[in-house]
Image (spheres, helix red, strand yellow):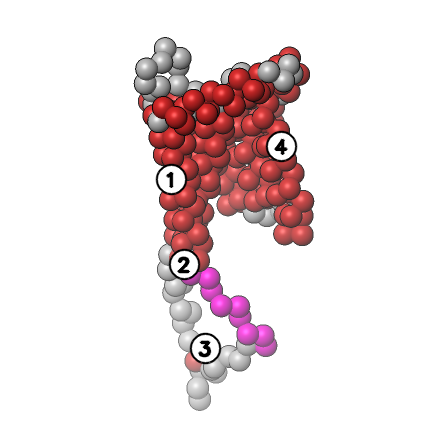
Amino acid sequence: MTSIAHARTVPLLDAPPRRDGRGGAVAGLVAILLGAGTVIVSYVVGVLDASGRAVDDAVLRAALGLGLRREALDLLEIVGIPTVALAVVALAGLALARGRGARAVSVVALVLGAQLITQVLKAGLVRPDSTDANSLPSGHVTLVASLGVALVLVVPRVLRPPAVLAGLAVTGIAGVATMVAGWHRPSDVVAALGVVLATTGAISLAGALLRGRPRRRSAAPSPIAS
């Protein structure tokens, strides 16, 4: 008599196809290239090129001329280590509460990774023919933009559109505030967005590659003779 273990099972419902992660890998790679390209173009045009640097400085002077520096500084003071740490913990906690452990890790990796890249670039890049310290990319805009992306990652799908709008709005306000306060030029803001985009792409690529790895099959149970 044929053993029960060798009997063919017929699923009640068709199992969903396993995602191989190729789409996520391609999207992640594209985001990395676009983000890196944005940083490079921002630096070349806004810092190395004399004409671009003049336009960059002119926009900064116009922003300072609005006379809202005190208000901008008060707004930027919110983006401090305690506030950012609390936001990261809250977003990671939300992901864990939804059973999304990988998303919780992504939140921490995104915020810390983007800020690390920004600080390395800021320390390594120079402004030729200038005594000013390099300010590209903006650390504040990097923090706010990365938190906006993290919010989109952890909320339920139905809430993602308003989360995207909220992230864009807050990031835009932060970018304008850094210029009105006299801290950053437009190229610094754009480069920060490029850093966040590239970091998001790297995390997406890593996640896609991990999802695409073949899983080890568990050992087949011993047949039970009937």
Spatial CA distance of label 4 from label 2 is 32 Å
Amino acid type, label 2? Arg
Which callout, 4 or 2, points to the residue nearer the camera? 4
**Front-most of 37 and 105?**
37
Q: Which residue is mark 1?
A: 37
Crowding at dot 3, Cα within 10 Å, few <14 / some 14-19 / many 20+, comes out as some
Q: Which residue is mark 2?
A: 22
| Quarter of the image where one finds residue 77 | top right
Along the polypeptide, which appears first: circle 1 or circle 2?
Answer: 2
Residue found at x 54% / y 34%: 145
Which quarter of the image is occupied by the N terminus?
A: bottom left
Residue 212 x %, y %? 40, 57
Query: Magenta residues?
Result: 12-20
Q: Secondary structure at mark 4?
A: helix
Tell me if I can see residue 146 in this picture.
yes
Q: Going by the picture, which residue comes out furthest to the bottom? A: 1
Residue 170 circle label? 4
Spatial CA distance of label 4 from label 3 is 59 Å
Residue 6 x %, y %? 43, 80
Amino acid type, label 3? Ala
Spatial CA distance of label 1 from label 2 is 22 Å
Q: Is residue 11 magenta?
A: no
The main secondary structure of the magenta stretch is loop
Crowding at dot 1, Cα within 10 Å, few <14 / some 14-19 / many 20+, comes out as some
Q: Is the C-beta separation of discs 1 and 3 under 8 Å?
A: no
Q: In the picture provided, is 84 more to the left or to the right than 55? A: right
Which callout, 1 or 2, points to the residue nearer the camera? 1
Q: Secondary structure at mark 2?
A: helix
